[in-house]
Image: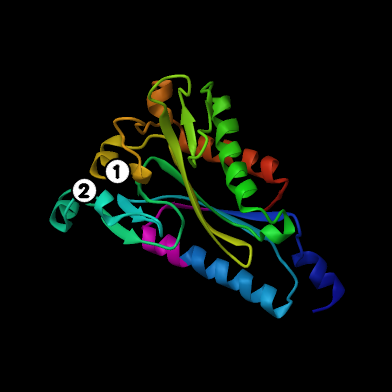
Amino acid sequence: MNDSQRNLTFHPHGVRVEDLGLVAFDHAWEYQTKIHCDLIERKRNGDPFEHHTLILCEHPHVFTLGRSGKEEHLLKSSDEMKAIQAEYYAINRGGDITYHGPGQLVAYPILDLERLFCDVHRYIRSLEQVIIEVLEQYDVESGRIEGLTGVWVDLGSDKPRKICAIGVHLSRWVSLHGLAFNANTNLDYFGYIVPCGIDPKQKPVTSLAKETGKEIDMPELKERFTRQFLKTFQLEFIP
């Protein structure tokens, strides 16, 4: 590869955004894992860095359990899972159990954090900040709760509501998995689990549609999220 070819493919602050639409969880997991492993392999081989990747998608009904989660937080049997047309996967991200489904914006950033900052806590806080800024565009105030991961609304009440869950995995400072932002999500499915291991009677789950009282335009939400993601992480869009 000559110098001119390298210049065409080398984007130290570039991110390629891929919208997969509604895609089965296992397919998206396999796809992001391939990108993740390819990026790690390039680092091991000393190959030129090309770009980061941000995958956006929605999933059919599925519950996923993180490494630190408890299986008993899934409250349904396998037969009951079939009745509600939901799948279940134990995966390698952090955190406990959560739900993905139609109307939820799922984002999988595959970033080489060595090119941004080597700080996992800063990474999670940055993901939270993206959601906080996006919610502000919908006139919804949100923030963090000390000791808990994710984004919450109605923080001044005795029952703050969770609107975004975050669970990540890092290998050689390359990120995997990401966040689930409830937009038009069917919140009934959270009743089949103990979301993120937190009693929903004390800290319930909510959605942007519920908070605003209207259905959310998903293409518009994805556009706003992408713009804010690029701004927060100081990255450039690669078409």
Q: Position of residue 9 (x, y in %)?
A: 75, 66
Nearest to the observer: residue 223 or residue 51: 51
Q: Position of residue 185 (x, y in %)?
A: 35, 37
Nearest to the observer: residue 131 or residue 202: 202
Q: Is residue 184 above or below residue 13?
A: above
Q: Residue at x 37, y 63 (%)?
A: 26
Residue 3 is inside the magenta segment: no
Q: Position of residue 117 (x, y in %)?
A: 71, 54
For the N terminus, which image quadrant?
bottom right
CB-based contact (under 8 Å), mark 1 and mark 2: yes
* Left or right: residue 56 compared with residue 49: left
The amino acid beneath tag 2 is: Leu
Is residue 165 in sight in this rendering?
yes
Q: Residue at x 56, y 67 (%)?
A: 35
Residue numbers of the magenta segment? 19-30
The amino acid beneath tag 1 is: Val
Nearest to the observer: residue 172 or residue 177: 172
Residue identified by numbered label 2: 75
Q: Residues within 10 Å of mark 2 (few under 14, many from 20)?
A: few
Farthest-out residue, right: 3
Is residue 215 in sight in this rendering?
no
For the C terminus, which image quadrant?
bottom right
Residue 194's label in the rendered image is 1
